[in-house]
Amino acid sequence: MADKGKDKEGNIVVKTEGLVKFYGKNKALNGLSMNVPERAIYGLVGPNGAGKTTTLGILSTFIRPNSGSVEIYGNDIIKEPEKIRGLIGILPQRAEFYANRTALDIMTFYSKLAGLNGKEAFENADRLLDKVGMTEHKDKKMKEMSHGMFKLMGIAQTLIGNPKIIMLDEATSGLDPKVAYNIRKLVRELKKDTTIIFSSHNLYEVEDLCDYVGIIHNGKIIAEGRTKSIVKKGKSLEKVFMEKMEE
Ligand SMILES: Nc1ncnc2c1ncn2[C@@H]1O[C@H](COP(=O)(O)OP(=O)(O)OP(=O)(O)O)[C@@H](O)[C@H]1O
Ligand SMILES: [Mg+2]
């Protein structure tokens, strides 16, 4: 059978090997290797400064590694960055938007950049804002948004262009329980046809939401696999995480 041995979620679509990244003398990534299966929700966890944002920056082609390799759907990040940009959507940890424009304006603008014409772009913007629960706030200027509305806007923006892979860097940090719940619900829906890399400091959230977990520490993945196999019976991801930090 052709599918024999494949993960339920599919083939590995993001593969990094031995990534090294220096910022000046500071070694942010120290040989990071990770494998993300298609249509999985992959939780990226690790302490502050471990290298999560740097890793996502490299995967999204914004940051160039000093050495190591990344393949996304078989495309090499250094040789074929344009192809990769067409496959991904990213919510940066600190997303920025024009302060004086409304959510709908900005989403329409980005939809046009993605190649849609005026009416299509407007409809796409409206649909995606609705999808993330922002319809009520779509005419607010970005400077008038709460932290949660800002995050939701960022998530809506990642969905423009129907990416195959979505990377969310701390999508739920600082959100009220209902908005965080709705984001997790949306992520589960997106999983039907998208691969999601989800960084978070909320280990209970990751344990509940993510099919796979990668624990990153000092610029390396120190444990990776199905959440079920990382979190052994009777333990929590938090307990496993704490043990790993002490090894
Ligand atoms: N632009 C930069 N210039 C210099 N050093 C940086 C820069 N960005 C990150 N670093 C350093 O690289 C290391 C990894 O940082 P990174 O932001 O990737 O970690 P993180 O896991 O995302 O942390 P957090 O959980 O706090 O968001 C840290 O030592 C950090 O100080
Ligand atoms: Mg970060």
Image (tube, rainbow, N blue to C red):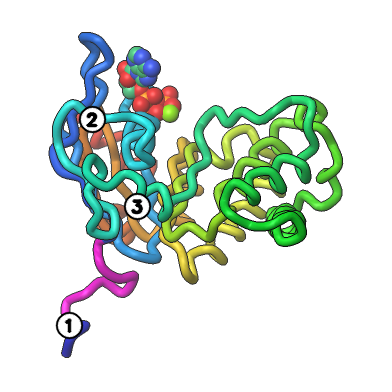
Mark 2 packing: few (<14 Cα in 10 Å), some, or many (20+)?
many
What residue is pinned by disc 3? 83
- Relative height, residue 66 to residue 5 (above, below): above
Q: Position of residue 135 (x, y in %)?
A: 81, 52
Q: Which mark is residue 245?
A: none
**Quarter of the view holding residue 96:** top right
Of residues 237 and 41, the one nearer the viewer is: 41
- Disc 3 crowd, CA 10 A, few/some/many (<14, 14-19, 20+): some
- Residue 242 seen in render: yes
Residue 26 position in % (x across, y down): 24, 13
Tell me the element at label 2: loop
Q: Secondary structure at mark 3?
A: helix
Distance from the alpha carbon under mark 2 to that under mark 3: 18 Å
Residue 124: x %, y % from top left: 70, 59
Which residue is disc 2 drawn over?
65
Q: Earlier in the sequence, mark 1 or mark 2?
A: 1
Which mark, by number, is residue 4? 1
The mark closer to the camera, 1 or 2, is 2
